[in-house]
Amino acid sequence: MAIKADFHLHSSYSGDSQAPMEEMIRKGISLGLSQMCFTEHMDFDFPVSTDTPAGFFEVNTDSYLYDLLKYKAEYRKEIQVSFGIELGLQAYLTGLQSAYTNAFDFDFIIGSSHLCKGRDPYDALFYEGRTEEEAYREYFSSIIENLEAFHDFDIYGHLDYVVRYGPGKDKNYTYEKYQDLFERILDLLLENGIGMEINTGGLRYGLKELHPCRKVLERYREKGGETVTVGSDAHRPEDICREFGRAETLLKDCGFSYYTVFSKRTPSFIKL
């Protein structure tokens, strides 16, 4: 496996994971990783429900960093452990998002769309009363709004995340159907120096492709995009690096010779 860095990982500091950070690190070492970046959830103003009480997706960043620095030092001879965050983007939260990204010396920031106009695509109600295509178009349109409002992050995470949860998932989903929106999204990424993530986690939801679908990645490369990180979106040790061989093949097939890692918000390119 040429890819030796997993740049999308969650531990028990994320509300939807119970995995101890040290257990995740030990698993990464056993898999032969040279670097792993924790990207705990920070989703401000996430809708409160029975399953997601207030603050459920808001990491205690000071406590998270304390443990990360402890393990970073303890395992420094075996693996590089990096300090990241997955920031849930919403256009109206630009001021809060900016204050947060400036408050800590992150190595890496993923910007992700877990919500669309305050609604969760995970919830079946998001699709009720309209076609799947209408719901997907609203989601991709919200990414454009996010990118136009805020761009202090390094990579856009799982760009077509919504297809994990749609009624037909990605069965009827194609790049061409949403080409007008994707072209604008890709242009905004490139204009603002934001890269893209290959996220292998979607396969665990029964998708036929990785995030994003192949054609989005091809168009990003055709437009001159070069910055691509690879992340498993693992919330358990057993999912670290899952399907990285497939991600490597996809990168090469789309014309990439390198994958990207970050340190102190600065990219480095590693040959495949």
Image (spheres, helix red, strand yellow):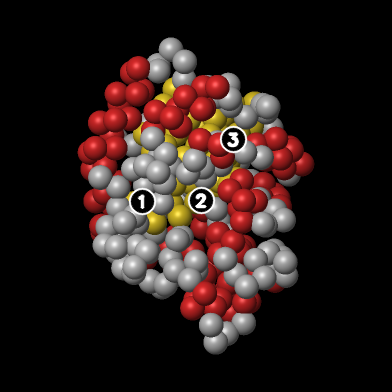
Q: CA distance from mark 3 to mark 2?
A: 16 Å
Q: Nearer the viewer, mark 1 or mark 2?
A: 1
Which residue is tagged 2?
A: 157
In the rendered image, residue 31, in percent from the top left (x then y), is placed at: 58, 25
Residue 198 vertical position relative to residue 175 in the rendered view, above or below: above
Name the foreground residue: 122 vs 270. 122
Q: CA distance from mark 3 to mark 1?
A: 21 Å
In the rendered image, residue 159, in percent from the top left (x then y), is placed at: 55, 56
Residue 203 vertical position relative to residue 179 in the rendered view, above or below: above
Q: Residue at x 43, y 66 (%)?
A: 115
> Could you tell which of marks 1 and 2 lies nearer the N-terminus?
1
Q: Residue at x 62, y 73 (%)?
A: 167
How busy is the neighbourhood of tag 2: few (under 14 within 10 Å), some, or many (20 plus)?
A: many
Q: Residue at x 60, y 70 (%)?
A: 166
> Could you tell which of marks 3 and 2 lies nearer the N-terminus?
2
How busy is the neighbourhood of tag 1: few (under 14 within 10 Å), some, or many (20 plus)?
A: some
Q: Which amino acid, by three-letter code, is at mark 1?
A: Gly
Left or right of 201 on screen, residue 150: left
Q: Residue at x 29, y 63 (%)?
A: 53
Which residue is tagged 1?
A: 15
In the rendered image, residue 260, in percent from the top left (x then y), is placed at: 55, 34
Left or right of 96 on screen, residue 30: right
Q: Quadrant of residue 244?
A: top right
Say whether marks 3 and 1 touch (CB < 8 Å): no
How busy is the neighbourhood of tag 3: few (under 14 within 10 Å), some, or many (20 plus)?
A: many
Q: Is residue 184 visible to the viewer in this orientation of the structure?
A: no
Residue 112 vertical position relative to residue 256 in the rendered view, above or below: below
Q: Secondary structure at mark 3?
A: loop
Which residue is tagged 3?
A: 241
Quadrant where the N terminus is found in the figure: top right
